[in-house]
Amino acid sequence: MKMKFVIQNSIKNKLMLGFLIVVALTGVSSIFAGYRIINRGIIEQAYESVRSDLKTAQYIYNNRLFQIEMTLNYIGTLDYMSRAVEARSLSFLQAKFIRLKDWIGADIIIITDSKGKVMLRVNNTGFYGDSALDIQCIRQVVETLKPSYGSGILTRDILAKEGEDIVDKALVKVIPTEMGRHITKDHEDRALVLNAATPMFSDGKMVGIVYGAFIVNNNFEIVDRIKNLVFHSDDVTDYSAGKATIFLDDIRVSTNVVRSDGHRSVGTQVSSKVYESVFDRGEDWVDRAFVVSRWFLAAYTPIYDTNNSIIGILYVGVPQERFDKIKNNTIKYFLFISLITAVCAAVIALYLINRIVKPINEVVYASDVIAGGNYSKKLRVFRESELSHLSEAFNRMIDAIFDRDMRIKETAHNQVAQSEKLASLGRLAAGIAHEINNPLTGVLTYSSMLKDDLAGTEYVDDLNVIIDETLRCRKIVKEVLDFARETRLEKEHADINKVLNGTLAILEKHVNLRKVKLTKIFAENIPGILVDVNQMKQVINNLALNAADAMPDGGELIIETSFIEEENSVLISFKDTGAGISAENLSRIFDPFFTTKEPGKGTGLGLAVIYGIIERHNGRITVHSIQNSGTEFIIKLPVG
Ligand SMILES: Nc1ncnc2c1ncn2[C@@H]1O[C@H](COP(=O)(O)OP(=O)(O)O)[C@@H](O)[C@H]1O
Ligand SMILES: [Mg+2]
């Protein structure tokens, strides 16, 4: 029971261990691969989303520009406005535009004549008559007679003409930061503007230009709208939300990126890396960027003026920790799923392993039972089980073992019976032979004496018959005594090949063997064995003479020796080409007095004697015979 338990456990443990190693290896590699895929996937996704956020931001920025441009274009189509400009009805225009300025959310409105000479500054009615051609948009309308709009830069001089409050509105103090560019100025007094100029026509003739500008500096309308629409956040101090910034040149002039003190980081600079990409190469820049105080996944795109020169940058960025959070959650989820899968796999494996181990256990158990001699224990043959073959084979093996066991028992039984038969017959025969031997000696003595006395008479022939027959009787009696006598073996070390050679040399001259061809096949590696040489000679004589008797018309007798290493025994074979033995007689030839020879020729004791001798040598003699073809006697003698 303990053994069974140990076997079961070791198989189970090995299977379990092997399986767990496989699960662990695949688990670790899939987690590793999964981690990389998730990581890359999320980062790609993140950049993709930042890119698309930038497009939306651009759209919102442009939309603010269109608001101004479209309103001015609409005014340009109004006849009464054109006529007012043509007639220079300044107080009318001033009254109209002061309201319009608020309506379109413009900071500056200027009306010029068709040459660009200022007719009316809505912010500063007292200052006019100067040229406004230093404003790019206005110059373009003068040159092309078509509306012009876009981003632009207004210098401090232009702003100053609008009044001190406008200069102040645009003024940005430059603040140094760790990652910012090397500072070249301590403040920015120019204004980044969204501006538009539209020509006014009267009777097909350009009579003037209306110009409007929206100052981006320090105005957070656009960036906050982007933050609101794109990142769904109203709170400037929400650090985890996405951010937007508008740069004039390299300075943040409008932003909702907040410094650690909670203030918007207006006045800080862009990093040189981004500046070079956007300004020097005119390329969008999408990457991780350290903005003011933290890492962002950031996207920057150039802002062009109406002359297609880059004057600023539009930026959107999402704090990296947002994606880190998504990434971590995804990885946690992935790990959780992996763990659950591994646990499920282990449970399934345990079930399968049990299914495999169970029949093996039964085999082990059945083996124990069978080893105890109970052959009735059969294994269940599991249907659909991979191990059904094993069970079937095992059951076949039990049957085979059972058969062999029975055969061995039968042979042993026969042997015992044969020995007992020989022994009792021997005792009986010896008794009779003793009783006969003495009278026979008397008969022989007296008939010899009578023969001498009656020499020359007619009785001599009869007396010769008596003497011959008495001698024959004595021979039989001697044979019986030989058979019966359990002589002590006088064992000596002998080379069986030598014993055979010596005996056969004498036998060859025997009359009966004249027509028989003797073939000897002797192995050379035969170890010496302990035998009673005289008795062995008797065995050889008897076998050879029997063979000769079976071949009255001649034939071949092959005598072969060999050494069987695995049995550590010497084999001697006598094989003839004689008459063979019928199946019926085969089982009786070792019986004493069994003979097929005519009376007077055989006593039927030869093989019985041989059997006894071989048995006393702890050897075995067996016979194979095919009728009309030949017979082989095989003797096996143990070495040592
Ligand atoms: N080599 C043989 N070929 C054929 N039959 C044999 C051979 N050896 C023995 N026998 C058979 O076995 C019988 C018994 O032999 P054995 O005991 O030597 O007695 P016997 O030779 O006196 O008959 C023989 O009568 C014969 O029928
Ligand atoms: Mg014989």
Image (cartoon, rainbow, N blue to C red):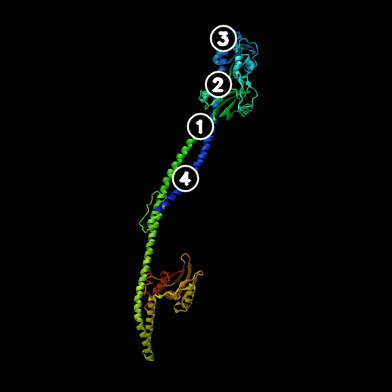
In the image, taking residue 481 as reference, residue 180 lies left or right, namely right
> Residue 57 occupies which quadrant of the picture?
top right
Disc on the earlier residue, 1 or 2: 2
Give me the C-alpha separation between circle 2 and circle 4: 59 Å
Cβ atoms under marks 1 and 2 closer than 8 Å: no
Tell me how far mark 2 sits from mark 3, CA to CA: 28 Å
According to the picture, the residue beneath numbered tag 1 turns out to be: 325
Give the residue pinned by disc 3.
95
Left or right: residue 409 versus residue 289 is left
Q: Quadrant of residue 268?
A: top right
Q: Earlier in the sequence, mark 2 or mark 4?
A: 4
The foreground one among 250 and 68 is 250
Q: Which mark is residue 222?
A: 2
Residue 220: x, y in percent? 55, 20
* Left or right, residue 93 beside residue 564: right
At x 42% / y 46%, what residue is drawn? 352
- CA distance separating discs 1 and 2: 28 Å
Q: Amino acid at mark 4?
A: Leu
Dot placed on the residue nearer the N-terminal end, 2 or 3: 3
Q: Earlier in the sequence, mark 1 or mark 3?
A: 3
Q: Quarter for ligand 2?
A: bottom left
State yes or no: Cβ of the residue under disc 2 lies below 8 Å from any atom of ligand 1. no
Closer to viewer: mark 1 or mark 3 = 1
* Residue 63 visible (yes or no): no
Residue identifier under label 4: 20
Q: CA distance from mark 1 to mark 3?
A: 55 Å
Amino acid carrying mark 3 in the image: Ala
